[in-house]
Image: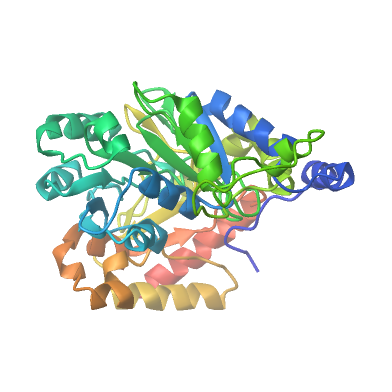
Amino acid sequence: MIPFSPPRIDDKIINEVIATLKSGWITTGPRTKLFEKKLTEYCGNKSTLCLNSATAGLEIMLRWFDVKAGDEVILPAYTYSATANVIIHCGAKPVFVDVNTNDFNINVAEIEKAITSRTKVIMPVDFAGLPCDYNEINALVKKHQAIFKAESENQKKLGRILVLSDSAHSVGATYNDKKTGSLTDVSVFSFHAVKNLTTAEGGAIALNLPEPFDYEEVYKTLCIKTLHGQNKDALAKTQKGNWRYDIIEAGYKCNMTDISAAIGLIELDRYDNDTLKKRKYIADKYKSILGSSERLQLPVFETTTKKSCYHLFPLRIKDITEVQRDEMIQKISKEDVSVNVHFIPVPMMSFYKGLGYDIRNYPATFDNYSREITLPLFYDLTDEQVERVCKVFLDALNSL
């Protein structure tokens, strides 16, 4: 059986987790704070807060920006449900827009059409590890600054629409030689088990807000908001006589543990020089085997301005129906090869259909989805396994 995306668990990871357990400090502590520092250095942003998921990070930033009922948040129709769910949690309206036809990322022209005086946030999604068009998106929020209606202190301070990047897939990717995390106001990473860089479960908010925001002050505010509204974390309370604390708001519980951070520290240390090189090697091998087929549309990994972090290998098959694609997946699965589809667009989900969203309004999204199959891509995938995946995939394709 060739799995789809198992995590890389080796002796370095195991030994660091054991050391954490033996240290006696397993919740948010010194390793989490070190991981935050290392991520900030790696990405080149201003400050980073590690949490238990990217989903928590997205929702906390919406709440920090005071997004509420009556507000609108623009996002791509082609994304995982978490991107939209957090908007619903805040009582705001998700405004889906279509994606590009050459890649899977949000279409900037469609964003501009969707901006209204109720728009508070734009949430681009770096699909499969390829950064969105951030120069254009950042310029767009400045262009439409005059119609922005600021209704809270943070909104008045920013004075425009917030760009909150769902960078769940894209840690380590670059745009104009700058890493994700430093490309716009705020970016949120995922370190879920299937991600390039995992902490088992986890995520991080990469803060890159402009002046007059004080990033240290924002970081402290978010620490409080993500730990029950408590003004001291467990590490601070261990100082002698420093037990007393206060609850200054009804906060949430989203903190990362040191056990998770221990995994992340090892992963980050070898990320550029090992993990990304291996993932690129595997993707290039897929391309070399499958690239000669005129029936396939290979994924975009590099442009003149962008470099992906090779999170997924999303193949699109030309002139195929959704039903035929599903038949292919069944045939591939019977040969003990695991493949996937990224993603079923959010407007196709029952909950969102019940709110009145219709996938027919997003033709590029549906076209991409209906003919997409994602091939396995993980660190320990061997050349022989890649060749077998390609053979089984092509056999299924040729059987149509």
Please indicate whether residue 126 sits to the left or right of residue 275 in the image. Answer: left
Residue 227 % position (x, y): 58, 49
Total marks placed: 0
Q: Which residue is more in the foreground, 370 or 256?
A: 256
Q: Residue at x 23, y 48 (%)?
A: 100
Please indicate whether residue 178 sits to the left or right of residue 267 in the image. Answer: left
Please determine whether, in this image, residue 369 is positioned above or below residue 261: below
Residue 142 appears anywhere in the view: yes
Please indicate whether residue 367 sits to the left or right of residue 240 in the image. Answer: left
Please determine whether, in this image, residue 159 is positioned above or below residue 340: above
Q: Which residue is more in the foreground, 9 or 370?
A: 9
Quarter containing the C terminus: bottom left
Residue 304 % position (x, y): 32, 27
Residue 260 % position (x, y): 69, 48
Please indicate whether residue 304 sits to the left or right of residue 19 in the image. Answer: left
Residue 281 appears anywhere in the view: no
Quarter containing the N terminus: bottom right
Name the colouring of the figure. rainbow
Residue 265 % position (x, y): 69, 36
In the rendered image, which quarter is residue 39 located in? top right
Q: Residue at x 63, y 64 (%)?
A: 2
Q: Residue at x 60, y 33 (%)?
A: 36
Please determine whether, in this image, residue 325 is positioned above or below residue 117: below
In the displayed orientation, state which residue is furthest to the right. Answer: 22
Please determine whether, in this image, residue 384 is positioned above or below residue 175: below
